[in-house]
Amino acid sequence: MIRTVAETGSTNDDVAALARAGAPEGLWLRAERQSGGRGRQGRSWHSPVGNLYASTLVRLHPGDPPAPTLALVVAVALKEVVSAFAPDPQVLIKWPNDLLVEGAKLAGILLERVEAAVVIGVGVNLAHYPDDVDRPVTSLAALTGSAPDPAAFLETLAGSFARWLGRWRGEGLAPVRSSWLAAAHPIGTALSTGAGEGLFDGLDEMGALRLRLADGTSHVIHAGDVFLI
């Protein structure tokens, strides 16, 4: 089920409230505009009309893989859909929550736990991108010359996410992790993190980032900002 509103403060906040009220898994809420959109660590998210701002709800079941690994599920689904709408640009997943094209951010993902559920927010620069941020950003319109309709984009994303969620729940994390790694920046990519600089060394079995340090040791990072060098 996809609901659309003209404007709201934050789709994640709205879906969190719906989760507490008993809303079912699979609900998607899309806003044409957000007045209080945010990314990870409370960063504001520029929200003009024409981009995608949407959130969904996953209710955790006994035996599910760890909840934080849902970030891998939605990243793989989102990469699949972006590549379908823009087949030429090289789209890469960057841990923990970004999609990049030629080093510029195209999309972001935000997971928030609500009791025994997870709210997943997705923002994609379809028509516009901000010009007042301190990192490279882009949009599908800038890359391809035209922007997909946000409603059509979300309908495709909802289907892709449902398929990958089914695999995550039925087959475990392994196939999701494998697909994520195939779509990510290559092993050996130089990264800067809160733990220092190092080389991307893949993901551990639970989806955490492995960073290979200069002395050859590997440091496992479960959360935090990561930048390509």
Image (cartoon, rainbow, N blue to C red):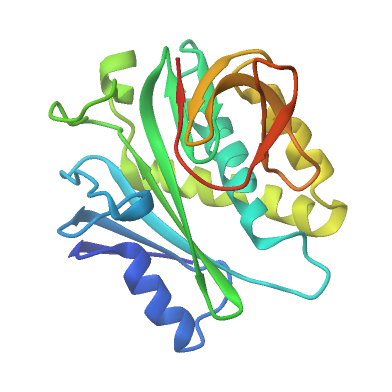
| Quarter residue 24 falls in | bottom right
Point out residue 220 in the picture as x, y percentages from the top left corner. 68, 39
| Quarter residue 11 falls in | bottom left
Look at 22% across and 26% down and name the residue there: 134
Q: Nearer the viewer, residue 44 or 117?
A: 44
Point out residue 106 in the picture as x, y percentages from the top left corner. 37, 29
- Furthest-front residue in this view: 215
Point out residue 146 in the picture as x, y percentages from the top left corner. 27, 21
Seen in the picture, residue 202 relative to 117 is either above or below; the reply is: above
Q: Nearer the viewer, residue 222 or 54?
A: 222
* Left or right of residue 21: residue 104: left
Q: Nearer the viewer, residue 224 or 109?
A: 224
Look at 42% across and 59% down and name the residue there: 55
Q: Quadrant of the C terminus?
A: top left
Look at 45% across and 89% down and name the residue there: 21
How many dots with numbers?
Answer: 0
* Left or right of residue 130: residue 191: right
Look at 24% across and 46% down and name the residue there: 45
Seen in the picture, residue 216 relative to 174 is either above or below; the reply is: above
Q: Nearer the viewer, residue 21 or 28?
A: 21
* Left or right of residue 147: residue 23: right
Point out residue 101 in the picture as x, y percentages from the top left corner. 43, 18
